[in-house]
Amino acid sequence: MKRGWSLRKFEGKWCEEEFSEGTLTEDTLALEIPEDGDTIEVRASSRDGLTFTGTYHFREGGYSDGEVTFQRYKGRQGEVLFGEWKEVGTAGGPWIIKVSD
């Protein structure tokens, strides 16, 4: 399992959360990120190991679900995904995820 943190801008504020349930391979991103009594499930796939596209879903349904796109960067101390989230038909924002073993 991978662990790390998530930094997502929502309604003008940055939301930072840690997670310990994640998978990141060359073709799959699967994370469960606890947030305010709910869990954000992120599921994305990649054809080249660098660009991931997929969806996010709030398990308890507290907020709308939407789409995600990330660019993957590898380093000695882990990996960083820079991207954005977008609710279907409405607002979105930047999303940064750091992943390590």
Image (spheres, rainbow, N blue to C red):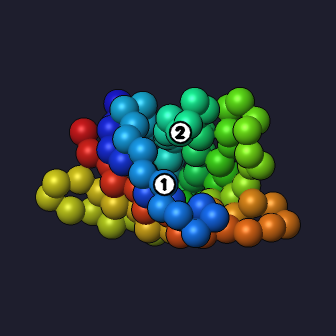
Residue 54 shows in this picture: yes
Residue drawn at 53 percent across, 64 percent down: 13
Estimate the x, y position of residue 31 in percent, counting from the top left: 49, 40
Q: Is residue 59 above or below residue 84?
A: above
Q: Is residue 75 left or right of residue 41?
A: left
Q: Which one is earlier in the sequence, the residue at label 2 or at label 1?
A: 1
Task: Name the secondary structure under disc 2.
Answer: strand
- Where does the N terminus fall, quadrant-wise? top left
Q: Are marks 2 and 1 in contact (CB under 8 Å)?
A: yes
Rate crowding at label 1 as few (under 14), some (14 to 19) or many (20 or more) other CA atoms within 10 Å: some
Could you say which is closer to the camera, residue 79 or residue 13? Answer: 13
Q: Which mark is residue 41?
A: none
Rendered location of residue 83, percent (x, y): 51, 68
Taking depth in this image into account, of 47 and 6 the one nearest to the observer is: 6
- Residue nearest the viewer, comparing 93 with 75: 93
User: Which image quadrant: the C terminus?
Assistant: top left
What is the three-letter code of the residue carrying label 2?
A: Glu
Three-letter amino acid code of the residue under disc 1: Cys
Left or right of 58 on screen, residue 21 = left
Q: Secondary structure at mark 1?
A: strand
Spot the residue most to the left.
76
Q: Which residue is mark 1?
A: 15
| Residue 22 at x, y percent in the picture | 42, 36
**Crowding at mark 2 (Cα within 10 Å: few <14, some 14-19, many 20+):** some
Which residue is drawn at the image coordinates 50% and 35% (left, top)? 34
Q: Is residue 44 left or right of residue 3?
A: right
Q: Which residue is mark 2?
A: 35
Structural distance between the alpha carbons of marks 2 and 1:
9 Å
